[in-house]
Amino acid sequence: MAEKKKWNARDLPDLAGRTAVVTGANSGIGLRAAQALAAAGAHVVFAVRDPERGEAAARTANGSTEVRRLDLADLSSVREFAAAWDRPLDLLINNAGVMMLPERRTADGFEMQFGTNHLGHFALTNLLLPYVTDRVVTLSSGLHRGGSGVIDFDDLNSTANYSPTGAYAQSKLANLLFTLELQRRLTEAGSRVRALAAHPGYAATNLQSHTGNPLLRGFMWIGNRVMAQPDTAGALPTLYAATQDLPGASYVGPDGLGESRGGPTLVGRSRAASDPVAAKRLWEASEELTGVRFPAGVGARG
């Protein structure tokens, strides 16, 4: 029996007339996803911290693009980006992220990984949600199972015994809990908008080069060249989650050994990432930290 053909970017539907925002679209998986969406006909907004790099990246896409500045580590930048938005938005892809950094703080004083990977996207999503017509896709990681394996609600900003890997794992677990609670709220509001999550497996990107540990950087450099799949393959779960008819709160990743590589498919998550009580508690804590709340009237609009 012939092996079933794996889904790839050539299987994307016609996206003409649709608009997508991709955060962190200047490199890596975000760039590959943005390029594929533009090639399929979507108008793609490269939401990036450095507009000059974003313009260079956008020029590599074959299709309709624009570049807008967005620094997820600064809530004033997130608010500015959202305040300038004035049209329907079909796809919001929360892709940008930082990984295993030395201890740093965002402009608002949050631990950098939690603040960028989770809180920045939390605020952006809720501020843009009145315009979203189809779905929100948020990038997590298989490493959401790492660290303590749960959200430390007594130390969300990792001020005690900071661990770069533990803080990263907490931020990626937060991405999945955010997706779970966002979908619950959308359903409760009667909205047709769906919230989904994806992870790229082990994909070769420049994300790994930004860790502050030289030994870890060296190990990842070798891994990128020996074990990792290319970033084009790493972007497939994002594209699959963004365009295929999947249930809300679905989680998409590679179908290969250990979910490290392969074609996109629905994958499992840790028990902690499926906890609705923790998801609701994290949402409420995130509202307090960012000052941004789930917008009223979403169900009436989409």
Image: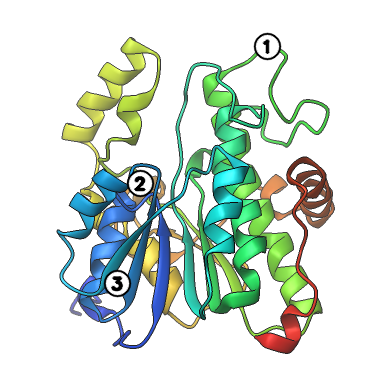
Q: Which residue is mark 1?
A: 161
Q: Residues within 10 Å of mark 2 (few under 14, many from 20)?
A: some
Query: Percent x, y for residue 127?
Result: 65, 62
Quadrant of res 203: top left
Quadrant in which residue 280 is drawn? bottom right
In depth, the one of 100 and 284 nearer the eye is 284
Q: Image check: 66 left or right of 49?
A: left
Give SS at disc 3.
helix
Q: Is residue 278 left or right of residue 254?
A: right
How far apart, in angstroms, are the residues tagged by discs 3 and 2?
A: 23 Å
Is residue 220 found left or right of 190 in the rendered image? left
Q: Is residue 183 above or below residue 274?
A: below
Q: Residue at position x 31%, y 65% from top?
A: 66
Q: CA gap, disc 3 to disc 1? A: 41 Å
Which residue is label 2 attached to? Answer: 260
Q: Nearer the viewer, mark 3 or mark 1?
A: 3
User: Closer to us: mark 3 or mark 2?
Assistant: 3
Contact between marks 1 and 2 (CB within 8 A): the answer is no
* Comes first in the chain, label 3 or label 2: 3
Residue 123 at what x, y percent from top left? 65, 53
Amino acid bearing label 3: Leu
> Does the rendering let one see residue 7?
no
Residue bearing mark 3: 37
How many circles with numbers are drawn on the protein?
Answer: 3
User: 8 or 75: nearer the eye?
Assistant: 75
Q: Residue at x 76, y 64 (%)?
A: 294
Task: Choose the circle earlier in sequence order: 1 or 2.
Answer: 1
